[in-house]
Amino acid sequence: MPSSSLIEFIDTALSCRSDFALSYSDSKQKWLIRKHLLSLIQDHPTFTISTDTFFHDDGTTVNLLCATGHLHVANHTPSIPLTIWIHKNYPLMPPMVYVLSYSMWSIHQDHPFVHSSGATSSPYLQTWEFPRCNLTGLVHNLVEIFSRDHPFVYSPAASFTHPSLISKMEALDRLSGMLHYDTIVLLAQTAVEIEGLYNLQPEMVKRNDIISSMIMELEHERMNLTHKVKNLMNQADVLVNWLRVNDAKSHGTKLEDDDIAFVAGDEDSRLLIESLATDSAIEDTMYALDKAVEQGVVSFDAYFRQVRMLAREQFFFRAKLVKLRGPSILHCP
């Protein structure tokens, strides 16, 4: 049981109406604060109760009750000095909790629930809801948290066992701690990647300059080629015009039919030219038929009939050539 002197101190502090009066105004609120403080002292006798001025981050000050003590969470680890400030609107608002550093022990910077300044936050405080939450439950939760993740000893929390073996709050605490450390690792990896990308930036700028220079050279070459094409087109037009004019002049005595390349001097010559032309045409036709058969365009029977007919006709014209020029004509190409 709390000592009578402690009970008297709490009662006096809550009933004081002087300039040093506490910032608790509602009588029902004061009764709940008294009840919760006595319950805390009964479960944790090492805590002491005092009053002091609390400075908020915005500069405002309030006179509050606070509980100060040490938590022993595990063997071979230092005890954890703790101060719990009772909020002006307690129990509707959670208390403010601070871990105090030793001269030889400091709070490690990666702790998931304790800031380097000592300010402490946990899922229990973040989800504070009266009457489910109170001072005794808070300290019990802090003992569980610090037994797994001591604020003075770096020891990332291990994954918990089967969910059926732990409470919902403990699972939430462990999950928060695991996420915190995973976030630290991820941030470290991200910092390394950012540093790598930052170091790569000058090389990328250099390559960009090279590519830009190559693009400019290619564009300059394209413009030169375009200019050369225009010049060649102009020269081609000049050449075509020149050919049109000079070709007409060179054919002042041209034949009536431009397609006639040779003119026979007599009847025998005319027959000779026609026979040679016909023989060449038959050879070309046979060659075309050979290709058509190879490609499957003409059937073999049709090919055979056509070749026989052409061969007969070719024999007739070659006989005429022999008669006109003699046997040597058969060896003409």
Image: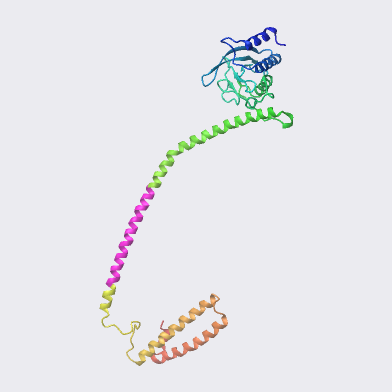
How is the rendered protein coloured? Answer: rainbow
Q: Give the position of the C terminus as an image quadrant.
A: bottom left
At a point 52% along the width and 33% down the height, the residue shown is 191
- Find residue 299 and report its image quarter: bottom right
Q: Was residue 236 drawn as part of the magenta stretch in this picture?
A: yes
- Based on the displayed image, in which of its 4 quarters is residue 318 positioned? bottom left
User: What is the total number of numbered labels drawn onto the structure image?
Assistant: 0
Q: Which image quadrant for residue 264?
A: bottom left
Does residue 178 appear in this view? Answer: yes
Between residue 53 and residue 25, name the one nearer to us: 25
- Nearest the viewer among 304 and 131 is 131
Q: Is residue 235 above or below residue 272?
A: above
Residue 158 visible at all: no
Q: Position of residue 22 (x, y in %)?
A: 59, 13
Chief secondary structure of the magenta span? helix
Q: Nearer the viewer, residue 175 or 14?
A: 14
In the image, the segment drawn in magenta is 213-242
User: Along the horizontal axis of the image, is 135 left or right of 104?
Assistant: right
89 relative to 3 in the view: left or right? left
Q: Nearer the viewer, residue 269 or 142?
A: 142
Whole-percent x and y of residue 230? 32, 62
Q: Quadrant of the N terminus?
A: top right
Instruction: Farthest residue to the top: give it.
Output: 5
